[in-house]
């Protein structure tokens, strides 16, 4: 049965904070603007029709929780320890939260990871973008280090995140025209290859 999507945010986004690890910071991309975080912010700006301040708080080798067995060897503080200083203090309109790789490699038990992630979710209203489902098994979107996504992988993640936000927040469409552009388009480009523009029905 058809169910209309609930709009969770209609007001424009002015500031985005990205909290995560090396993939969030952009390891292995050929240029910073190709990082998934930057790409999503850019797409949101385009369709929102207004500038967005992006603050990337990704840290390489960072983990979600100090309960991770590899925490002593990680880049500290963990997400749980720095969320107030690195996220809440900035009063962002939107937060990207991306963890799992280092905690998984570092041996964090799934139940510990889920509990810590839920604690962050309870403080920050989040929309799930299932980037893993888009990436799993696709070897050619991973850097030769066998760990981080390459430029193509970052694009795939960006598309998933952008889609999730768009499906849940109407602010993304703020820059869309209030009336149809069909006639303008037809006048400029015609009605198909070598066909004159017409009005409906035709």
Image: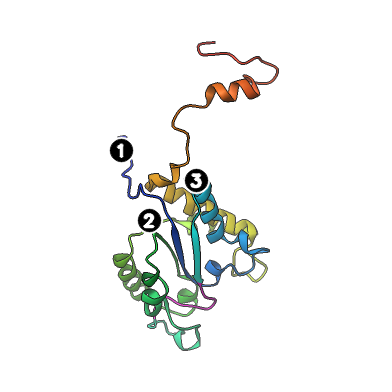
Instruction: Tell me the quarter of the image containing the C terminus.
Output: top right
Q: Earlier in the sequence, mark 1 or mark 2?
A: 1
Rendered location of residue 167, percent (x, y) = 40, 45
Do the CB atoms of the residues marked 1 and 2 lie less than 8 Å apart? no
Residue under label 3? 49
Residue farthest to the bottom?
72
Q: Is residue 48 above or below residue 72?
A: above
Marks 1/2: CA distance? 18 Å
The numbered disc on residue 148 is none
Marks 2/3: CA distance? 22 Å
Please tell me how many numbered marks the rendered image carries: 3
- The answer to which of 20 and 15 lies nearer the viewer is 15
Residue under label 2? 127
Residue 30 lies in the magenta stretch: no
- The magenta stretch is 58-65
Q: Earlier in the sequence, mark 2 or mark 3?
A: 3
From the viewer's perspective, is the residue at label 1 or at label 3 nearer?
3
The residue tagged with tag 3: helix, strand or loop?
loop
Rendered location of residue 22, percent (x, y) = 55, 72
The residue tagged with tag 1: helix, strand or loop?
loop
Q: Earlier in the sequence, mark 1 or mark 3?
A: 1
Residue under label 1? 3
Rendered location of residue 129, percent (x, y) = 43, 55
Marks 1/3: CA distance? 28 Å
């Amino acid at each position: 049965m058809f169910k209309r999507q609930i709009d969770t945010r209609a007001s424009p986004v002015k500031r985005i904070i990205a909290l995560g690890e090396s993939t969030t910071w952009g390891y292995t991309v050929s240029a910073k603007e190709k990082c998934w975080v930057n790409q999503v912010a850019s797409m949101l700006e385009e369709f929102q029709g207004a500038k967005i301040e992006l603050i990337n708080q990704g840290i390489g080798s960072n983990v979600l929780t100090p309960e991770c067995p590899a925490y002593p060897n990680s880049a500290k503080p963990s997400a749980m320890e720095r969320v107030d200083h690195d996220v809440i203090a900035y009063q962002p309109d939107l937060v990207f939260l991306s963890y799992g790789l280092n905690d998984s490699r570092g041996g964090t038990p799934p139940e510990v990871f889920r509990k810590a992630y839920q604690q962050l979710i309870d403080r920050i209203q989040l929309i799930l973008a299932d980037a893993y489902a888009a990436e799993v098994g696709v070897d050619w979107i991973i850097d030769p280090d066998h760990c981080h996504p390459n430029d193509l992988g970052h694009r795939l993640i960006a598309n998933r995140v952008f889609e999730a936000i768009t499906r849940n927040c109407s602010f993304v469409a703020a820059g869309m025209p209030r009336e149809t552009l069909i006639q303008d388009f037809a006048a400029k480009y015609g009605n198909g290859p070598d066909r004159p523009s017409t009005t409906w029905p035709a």
